[in-house]
Image: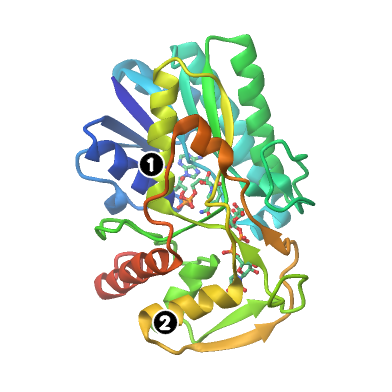
Amino acid sequence: MAVLVTGGAGYIGSHMVLALVDRGEDVVVLDNLSTGFRWAIAPSAKLIEGDVGDIEKVGSIIAEERIDSIIHFAGSIVVPDSVSDPLGYYLNNTVKSRALIEAAVTGGVTHFIFSSTAAVYGMPETFPVREDAPLAPISPYGSSKMMTEIMLRDSAFAYDFNYVALRYFNVAGADPAGRSGQSTPRATHLIKVAGEAVVGKRSHLDVYGTDYDTPDGTCVRDYIHVSDLARAHLLALDHLRGGGDDLVMNCGYGRGFSVLEVIDAVKRVSGVDFEVRMAARRPGDPAALVAGAERIRERLGWTPERDRLDDIVADALNWEKKLKDSGLNS
Ligand SMILES: NC(=O)c1ccc[n+]([C@@H]2O[C@H](COP(=O)([O-])OP(=O)(O)OC[C@H]3O[C@@H](n4cnc5c(N)ncnc54)[C@H](O)[C@@H]3O)[C@@H](O)[C@H]2O)c1
Ligand SMILES: O=c1ccn([C@@H]2O[C@H](COP(=O)(O)OP(=O)(O)O[C@H]3O[C@H](CO)[C@H](O)[C@H](O)[C@H]3O)[C@@H](O)[C@H]2O)c(=O)[nH]1
């Protein structure tokens, strides 16, 4: 039996593929390479180029590759783009997820793991935010993910189908062995952007807002190492294969760092003092977003292995240097 990883050529998906092949699983990747890279996929995994919305194609992959589980990363991820192109985001994230779920149900794939996001909470009133907090996304991106969660819940009720939805907080870092990392050229994520400033790809870094109601006035986030996140998926897969129940879980460490603390860590770890400019708030940023992180530890026995901010930053920086030297994504 094999695991189908959609979006396996992307940032998080490529780390998932590594984690799966490292433990000897057969892996098939379905990716349209819209933001992913062929070279990011571990050599022993099989890449099928195609779209998750192509229900016939997914149906034949399920049958021919003997798929028992689907881990679904494929999607569009840039929050501001979702505001300017909501229908594009609902198509790629919601409508195509619906097609994939139908192909899974029809093809007898009963285990499904879904990449959801803390963006489903919108501007949460609780800190840390637990899974039972109200869902109130403030962007089409967050809504598109919430709608997919609802389709999964209802499908699991109606059909022979089980799922785990993982709500990622701020994913960062790179494979500690340097085999993959975040490679998107137009990245907006803080640690990625800071790494680009370190290697000279950017002239400076803007801090979006210094007047938030937080200890130093800048936004606080829960940064989770991408390899710890991939291990959470392995545990979720084992849970479903063992007959476990449907689960919706936050993925974060339950602690936050401010934008200024992250910048300090990047400067400290790299030894490079890049220019930082204080700028206006970015629309739609909640002041503080930290995961209530008990459920995943209790239900899956997940324990982080690389949760020190300096380790997350060091792995991200190593990858950024490798990208620059190799020109892989340019
Ligand atoms: N990066 C984060 O901080 C973060 C946070 C929360 C949730 N997520 C979710 O995790 C998932 C992966 O994110 P990422 O950061 O690795 O993004 P990414 O852009 O690096 O990866 C997405 C992958 O999906 C592929 N893809 C997109 N649409 C497709 C389609 N219709 N058919 C087939 N392939 C398609 C892309 O080519 C790419 O390889 C996404 O669903 C995203 O919403 C990411
Ligand atoms: O150049 C930058 C980039 C970011 N920031 C700030 O750094 C913090 C983190 O921003 P990111 O863009 O790295 O991440 P977000 O918190 O906006 O969002 C990420 O995490 C969310 C869930 O928490 C969603 O999943 C979303 O898809 C994902 O991009 C924010 O306060 C942002 O304003 C800066 O100050 N300067």
Whole-percent x, y for residue 161 in the image: 52, 15
Residue 8 in view in this figure? no
Residue appearing at x 29%, y 65% in the figure: 328
Residue appearing at x 26%, y 56% in the figure: 179
**Image quarter hosting the C terminus:** bottom left
Whole-percent x, y for residue 289 in the image: 66, 57
Whole-percent x, y for residue 40 in the image: 30, 52
Is disc 1 placed on a helix, strand or loop? helix
Q: Nearer the viewer, residue 49 or 271?
A: 271
The CA span between labels 2 and 1 is 28 Å
Scheme of image coloration: rainbow
> Dot 1: few (<14), some (14–19), or many (≥20) neighbours within 10 Å?
some
Quadrant of res 159: top right
Q: Nearer the viewer, residue 247 or 117?
A: 247
Is disc 2 placed on a helix, strand or loop? helix
With 320 as the anchor, is 80 left or right in this view?
right
